[in-house]
Image (cartoon, rainbow, N blue to C red):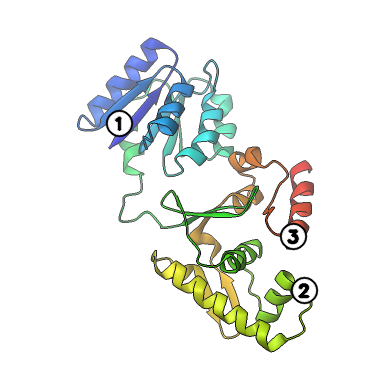
Amino acid sequence: MLIFAIDDEPKILRDTEQAIREAVPEAKLMCFALAADALAAIRDKRLRPDIVFSDIEMPGLSGLEFAVALKTASPDTRVVFVTDIPKYALDAFRVRAQGYIMKPLTPYEVRTELEALPTAGNRPKRLRVQCFGSFEVFWQGEPLKFSRRQTKELLAYLVDRKGASCTAEEIISALWGDVADMKNAKHRVRNFVGDLRETLRQIGMEDVLIRRGAHLAIRPEMLDCDYYRMLEDDMASVNTYRGEYMTNYSWAELTAGTLYFHNIS
């Protein structure tokens, strides 16, 4: 297990280190005076801590800003804020920190937070989906490979529908507009659906796709999606949105317009 501790006050950082070492002496512990240095270790050295105990008010990158950046750099890392300022409780909730502890940190509190960590056996498997900017899909930190660009576009359309089912006719109308040969177009859709199912099967995620007769949908709960998190007012996703949504697909412009008004409301 890898644990990070972050605090700009040397004495507090030493106390935090002592509490963690007493609670889990077998864990690997790395201490940082600056959140920016901890983030650099995650990004540059590709370290993936299981949990981070972090102060909030620090020079340069604050704990809240660190938590936002961490959601992209290491999405499975648990963040626990250790602070002496109660007013930040709501902010910690909005960036989806998993814990909020008043200083000083104790060994009991460390053990309590570690018990809440998901294990490899019970951590739900989810595809990471990027909708902001261009549409991209990642599996275990690597881009998911599609044999056909239309297969990837089909998945993008299903993600855009947020779990709502659709028919082949709806897919054809949205992705291709009016077609002269509907029978041939439906055949193409069936091929892309089969290809998508096989792509997901190869990584053990075929359950993402739902097929009910002539209707097709995805299970949103199996996706870690910036678009979905923004709709839930997750501040990490709100802060990464720059007005661009699935820019590789013209049919996504309608949702892009909706997101614009959601973001300014």
Q: Position of residue 81 (x, y in %)?
A: 46, 29
Alpha carbon separation for disc pair 2 and 3: 11 Å
The residue singled out by tag 1 in the image is: 108
The residue singled out by tag 2 in the image is: 177
Q: Nearer the viewer, residue 49 or 135?
A: 135
Label 2 secondary element = loop
Alpha carbon separation for disc pair 1 and 3: 53 Å
Contact, CB < 8 Å: mark 2 with mark 3?
no
Left or right of 246 on screen, residue 100: left
Compare marks 2 and 3 and give the one earlier in the sequence: 2
Q: Position of residue 220 (x, y in %)?
A: 55, 62
> Which residue is at the far left?
26
Q: Quadrant of residue 86?
A: top right
In the picture, which quadrant includes the N terminus? top left
* Residue found 51% across the figure and 71% down from its top: 196
Label 1 secondary element = helix
* Residue found 65% across the figure and 62% down from its top: 160
- Check disc 1 and give the amino acid type: Tyr
Q: Nearer the viewer, residue 250 or 239?
A: 250
Q: Which mark is residue 250?
A: 3
- Check disc 3 and give the amino acid type: Ser
- Check disc 2 and give the amino acid type: Gly
